[in-house]
Amino acid sequence: MYPLRRNRRLRTTETHRSLVRETTISPNDFLVPLFVVEGKGVKEEIASMPNYYRYSLDLLAKEVKELWSLGLKSVLLFVKVPENLKDNSGTEALNAEGLMQRAIKTVKDAVPEMLVMTDVALDPYSIFGHDGIVSEGKILNDDTTAVLAEMALSHAKAGADFVAPSDMMDGRIFEMRTLLEDEGFYDTGIMSYSAKYASAFYGPFRDALDSAPVDKKDIPKNKSSYQMDYANREEAIKETLMDIEEGADIVMVKPGLCYLDIVRDIRNAVNVPVAVYQVSGEYAMIKAAAEKGWLDHDAVVLEQITAIKRAGASIIASYFAKDVAKLLS
Ligand code: PBG
């Protein structure tokens, strides 16, 4: 009781504060999302993601070497697929010489110890911009999971350490795990986007990959029939527990900041690592406010990343990973 307890004592100097700090961040916490395009010498800035780029394979190799030197040891790959290779069933996603498969090899050749994770979903390959196969106004579940499992296998064959299904179809983790086991890929990890919400914060990402759902008759305008309703909390636990049962090694909550209650619920409910994806819209908001001089960029970034970790994340996918690694060093 006051004055026997004065809580401010422990906040007296930075030395006191660092002694009693409950949450610290390090480069080990991060997954670095990377956008890959065809071409040579390409480093294109994404309009709605200032200071974030799409790289061709040659510059991807250079970038991952720099990431490694900053202590960033895991990357999450996304590809921008040429329009003429898109269809409704993700044919190109299974091409052993496709951009993703070459990107995996490029990273492994440049930095063999780098942990390579790959996005598994059909949207960058889909003429309709959906994560699954579209038929009569619907996204087909089981036909899609069959393709996604093949896609995961193709990434594993190319050398991916982890596949990261971001599609939210039912049963896809089981399909993938079963196929990987059958084919002898016992050590390939699955990081499941297990509680992924239908969010308006993915806008800049869809610009980056040109992968937004198209506005056409009989094509669902949004992803709400597979991604979760943002009003729901209990459902996130159900989704996550099922993915673990089906064989996921790491589970994920996405987006980040608006969903920290979910992160804590899941942290308390499971005993596998919990990843959080601080998504493109979260990145864009900070960049825009900082450009206007309305927020202190670095301070806000560190505060948000720390909050995500404090909520229960053990892994954070963030477009700020490089900025943070530099700030910490
Ligand atoms: C694709 C995918 C998306 C993101 C990661 N994987 C977009 C979507 O579901 O529409 C979003 C990442 C971000 O916004 O940073 N399935």
Image (spheres, grey):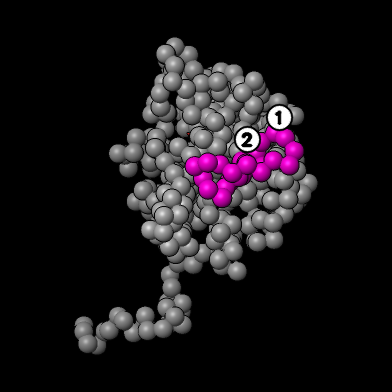
- Which kind of residue does numbered mark 1 sit on? Gly
Q: If you read the primary sequence from the N terminus, does the residue marked by circle 1 or circle 2 appear first?
A: 2
| Occupied quadrant, residue 296 | bottom left
Q: Residue furthest front?
A: 292
Disc marking residue 176? none
Q: Is residue 150 left or right of residue 309?
A: right
Disc 1 target residue:
98
Q: Residue furthest top?
A: 136
The answer to if 227 sits in the magenta stretch is no
Q: Label 1 to label 2, Cα distance in Å? A: 10 Å
- Which kind of residue does numbered mark 2 sit on? Val
Magenta stretch in the rendered image: 33-55
Residue at x 51%, y 35% (from the top left corner): 207
Residue at x 47%, y 22% (from the top left corner): 214
Label 1 secondary element: loop
Disc 2 target residue:
79
The answer to if 52 sits in the magenta stretch is yes
**Mark 2 closeness class: few <14, some 14–19, many ≥20 residues within 10 Å:** many
Vertical placement of residue 329 versus 12, above or below: above
Q: Position of residue 112 (x, y in %)?
A: 76, 50
Foreground: 58 or 308? 58
Residue at x 59%, y 64% (from the top left corner): 326
Q: Is residue 160 left or right of residue 274?
A: right
Where's the N terminus, which quadrant?
A: bottom left
| Occupied quadrant, residue 65 | bottom right
Where's the C terminus, which quadrant?
A: bottom right
**Mark 1 closeness class: few <14, some 14–19, many ≥20 residues within 10 Å:** some
Vertical placement of residue 297 versus 112, above or below: below
Q: Position of residue 177 (x, y in %)?
A: 59, 34
Q: Position of residue 80 (x, y in %)?
A: 61, 33
Q: Find out whether the residues at labels 1 and 2 contact each other: C-beta distance under 8 Å.
A: yes
